[in-house]
Image: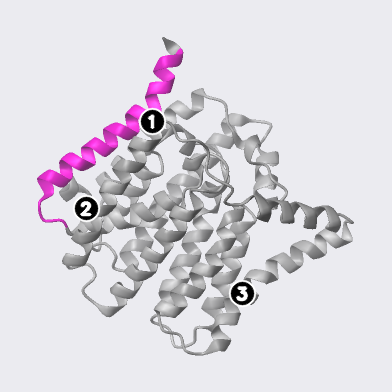
Amino acid sequence: MIRFFRHSYLQQLIAIVLLVFVLWLPSFFSPSSAADFLNPATPLYNVFARLLAFSPTLMKVFALLVFIVSAFLFNSMLSVNLLVTRNSSLGSLMFTILLCFTPEQCDFYPFLLSVPLIMMAIQTMCLLYQEEKSEPYLMNCGVFISIASMIYFPSAFLVVWMILAMVTMKFKSERLYIIPVFGFLMPYAVLFAIYYFTRTLPDSVEAYSAAFSSLFSGMSGLNTKDVVIFAFFGVLLLLSVPLIRSGNIVNSIQTRKKYGVTMILLVFGIVMLFVPGPVYCNGLFFFVMAVITAMALSDVKKTRIADVLLLIMILAAVTNQYLPLIKKVI
């Protein structure tokens, strides 16, 4: 199975799209929770959610299309940055499995809509290492994260990740560290100007203050199934990291730097699990796990064991998606 997805031809793309449809199908038989995520601190998400509120089915279709596009952009991002072998579709496969692992993830929710912008920010940071003039890239990265935070508010903390990534890449000029922060603030300057002219600025400031104060107040309670899932992901992480470090993927300074930036992002993903709301909808952790597992599988030598593990993951994802639907029918 892994050998099959180490290529990226039409048959692999069709297989991934079919897997996406299989995993997303049960979500069309359950109500959308999009309204639960409406928040004054996520104005762009609110716009999308209210525009599509007249048709829950259309809302799910829109989310599905965003997911499919994100899966292939994710694969392209890994391939371009040599984090997986070239012409591999393992990135799309792991993105699909890990971000469709539970029913909550197959819906219209803020993190999913922000994923393309977060990927654009990550790709921009990866380009910094090979460009002489980094100022435009730093500015763009700040802007991407700023717009993403208007959809999924906790992504605002990726500004800190940007600064740490720059430290990892050994940027020496203090001036460069200010540029992404300035880029982040620019869209908010426009947004708050709109609030000012529409006379809603005081209420908006209060809403953002409340959003900040409620962050990291504790994740939702975990049941036995959740504990098992996160324990499995922990084992997966422990298996993947040694494979990456001993393999041929991180065999250059450039890829080692990018891998280091990825591990910093993993820390932020773990922290964001504690943001209030459905834990699986704070999906940065699963996003980074998709990067790490794709890197490990692209270079693994014992493919039979890895094939069994991959098959277990796919079956677990399918079971998680269809079991609630089967219980409803019975």
The kind of secondary structure element at disc 3 is helix
The secondary structure that most of the magenta stretch takes on is: helix
Magenta segment: 300-328
> Mark 1 touching mark 3, by CB under 8 A?
no
Task: Give the residue number, with chain letter if any, for mark 1.
Answer: 224
Chain-order first, disc 2 or disc 3: 3
Task: Give the residue number, with chain letter if any, for mark 3.
Answer: 181
Q: Which residue occupies 65% across, 76% down?
A: 182
Q: Which residue occupies 36% across, 48% down?
A: 95
Give the amino acid at mark 3.
Val
| Camera-side residue of 274 and 40 | 274
Would you say 305 lies left or right of 277 here? left
Give the amino acid at mark 1.
Thr
Chain-order first, disc 1 or disc 2: 1
Q: Is residue 16 visible?
A: no
How many neighbours does mark 1 have within 10 angstroms: few (below 14), some (14-19), or many (20 or more)? few
Question: In the figure, 106 relative to 148: above or below?
Answer: above
- Foreground tag (2 vs 3): 2
Measuring from the top left, give residue 232's x and y in whole percent.
Answer: 29, 42
Q: Which residue occupies 31% across, 77% down?
A: 254
Measuring from the top left, give residue 184's x and y in whole percent.
Answer: 63, 70
The kind of secondary structure element at disc 1 is helix
Measuring from the top left, give residue 248's x and y in whole percent.
Answer: 17, 68
Task: Give the residue number, with chain letter if any, for mark 2.
Answer: 239
